[in-house]
């Protein structure tokens, strides 16, 4: 089998005003991502996703150009089933022959950020092709799913203190969730304002529902410590990204100061970044985003590090259907995967991009057995929302 074409498309979907939310990222008026399509001479097409940021909006011209202009020419004619080889070729660039021969990396300079995100989209699509060629779901290629379904948590929570309880209760009713996540941090103006909202949320949902908080890395170390102290009696399941991903030492300091589990990782690239995060003692729950960290290939390596450190894996799944499905399969096959993120904000990239659905019933998501990622993108939707003339 040979790759005949690789094409990345910037997809931008307007969000209806009534469903827009405001956070430290600003007002969410669109949902943007890069969808990667890889065609083969066996008439098998693989789908992937590459992201420039963990949020739902962004400018994707550069990322799309990188895939279409730099990576696509390298990939055409390659065997798509040689996933490990392709990963090394893209990661190591002109020195890939050394890496393939000697068994250690010779990465191209500055091989982080947008380059790894681009590789992620390609890698996810290649695993999709492999699964389809064998008639097997992705989780089977990774050793099989541990369970037939996994618990999910409802991810959202932007309302003010007087409305956060009703907002979170609506999530619980939507799919029988027993866990919810809300946003805190700089959007509230101060740690005590965030704490006020969290206390109101806990009072509204009761003691038996897991409650997570996500600060998007917007607090200083001292602010994060203050917040943890103020919500010490709220039984938080975890506190996500209290400080910037650029400060693993600060993150470790926050973790040491509180009994609240710390979650992070959605902004990290490759197993090397995650090794630093883990060895720094900075995290309890590790959250790679498969459209950012290096795809399925690298996520499996990251999951091994997480398991070896006796930590837990909860992939960042605020994404489109390709990255969501990939993360779901990796979590289901991993020894340390334990819960799935499910967006309760406006997310057309999950609910409208593909023909399949990922229903939540009684707070659980069934792990699908469809070949590959188990998704079929709608070509009409892609064409309607494609950003043309850029990248």
Image (spheres, rainbow, N blue to C red):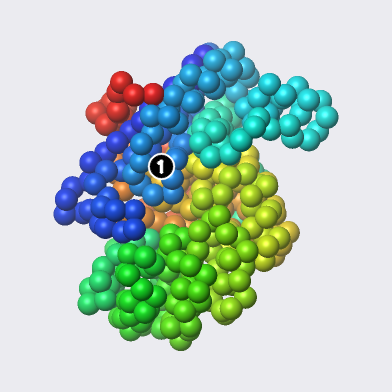
Residue that badge 1 annotates: 321
Residue 73 versus residue 91 in the image, above or below: above
Number of other residues with Cα within 10 Å of mark 1, as a class: few under 14, some 14 to 19, many 20 or more = many
Residue extending farthest right: 102
Residue 316 versus residue 65 in the image, above or below: below
Is 96 or 370 nearer to us in this picture?
Answer: 96
User: Dividing the image into 4 quarters, which one contains the N terminus?
Assistant: top right
Residue extending farthest bottom: 233
Q: Is residue 370 visible?
A: no
Count the numbered circles shown: 1
The x and y percentages for residue 345 are: 30, 55
Answer with left or right where residue 185 lies relative to residue 309: left
Looking at the image, which residue is at 46% across and 86% down?
233
The x and y percentages for residue 113 are: 53, 40
> Which image quadrant for residue 162?
bottom left
The x and y percentages for residue 37 are: 45, 26
Answer with left or right where residue 368 lies relative to residue 353: right
Answer with left or right where residue 331 lies relative to residue 86: left
Q: Is residue 281 visible?
A: yes
Looking at the image, which residue is at 42% across and 69% down?
213
Looking at the image, which residue is at 25% across and 71% down?
160
User: Dividing the image into 4 quarters, which one contains the C terminus?
Assistant: top left
Is 218 or 93 nearer to us in this picture?
Answer: 218
Answer with left or right where residue 302 lies relative to residue 383: right
Instruction: Give SS at disc 1.
Output: helix
The x and y percentages for residue 85 are: 69, 27
Residue 356 versus residue 149 in the image, above or below: above
> Which image quadrant for residue 216?
bottom left
Looking at the image, which residue is at 35% across and 41% down?
58
Residue 373 versus residue 4 in the image, above or below: below
């Amino acid at each position: 089998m040979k790759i005949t074409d690789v094409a990345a498309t910037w997809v931008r979907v307007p969000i209806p005003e009534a469903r827009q939310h405001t956070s430290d990222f600003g007002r969410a008026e669109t949902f943007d991502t890069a969808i990667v399509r890889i065609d083969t001479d066996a008439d098998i097409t693989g789908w992937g996703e590459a992201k420039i940021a963990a949020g739902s909006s962004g400018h994707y011209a550069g990322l799309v150009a990188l895939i279409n202009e730099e990576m696509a020419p390298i990939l055409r004619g390659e065997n798509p089933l040689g996933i490990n080889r392709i990963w090394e070729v893209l990661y190591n660039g002109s020195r890939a022959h050394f890496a393939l021969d000697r068994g250690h990396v010779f990465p191209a300079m500055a091989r982080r950020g947008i380059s790894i995100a681009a590789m992620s989209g390609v890698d996810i699509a290649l695993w999709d092709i492999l699964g389809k060629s064998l008639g097997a779901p992705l989780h089977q290629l990774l050793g099989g799913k541990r369970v037939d379904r996994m618990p999910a948590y409802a991810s959202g929570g932007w309302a003010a203190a007087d409305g956060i309880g009703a907002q979170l209760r609506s999530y619980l009713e939507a799919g029988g969730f027993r866990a919810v996540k809300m946003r805190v941090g700089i959007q509230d103006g101060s740690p005590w304002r965030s704490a006020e909202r969290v206390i109101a949320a806990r009072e509204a949902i009761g003691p038996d529902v897991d409650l997570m908080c996500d600060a998007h890395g917007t607090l200083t170390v001292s602010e994060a410590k203050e917040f943890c102290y103020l919500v010490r009696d709220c039984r938080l399941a975890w506190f996500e990204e209290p400080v910037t991903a650029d400060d693993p030492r600060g993150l470790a300091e926050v973790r040491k100061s509180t009994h609240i589990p710390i979650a992070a990782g959605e902004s990290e690239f490759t197993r090397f970044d995650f090794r630093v995060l883990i060895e720094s003692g900075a995290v309890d729950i590790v959250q790679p985003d498969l459209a950012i960290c290096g795809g399925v290939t690298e996520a499996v390596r990251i999951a091994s590090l997480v398991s070896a450190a006796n930590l837990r894996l909860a992939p960042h799944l605020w994404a489109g259907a390709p990255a969501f499905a990939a993360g779901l399969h990796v979590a289901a096959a991993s020894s340390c995967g334990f819960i799935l993120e499910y967006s309760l904000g406006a997310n057309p990239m999950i609910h409208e991009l593909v023909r399949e659905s990922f229903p939540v019933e009684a707070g659980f998501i069934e792990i699908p057995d469809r070949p590959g990622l188990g998704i079929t993108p709608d070509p009409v939707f892609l064409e309607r929302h494609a950003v043309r003339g850029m990248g």
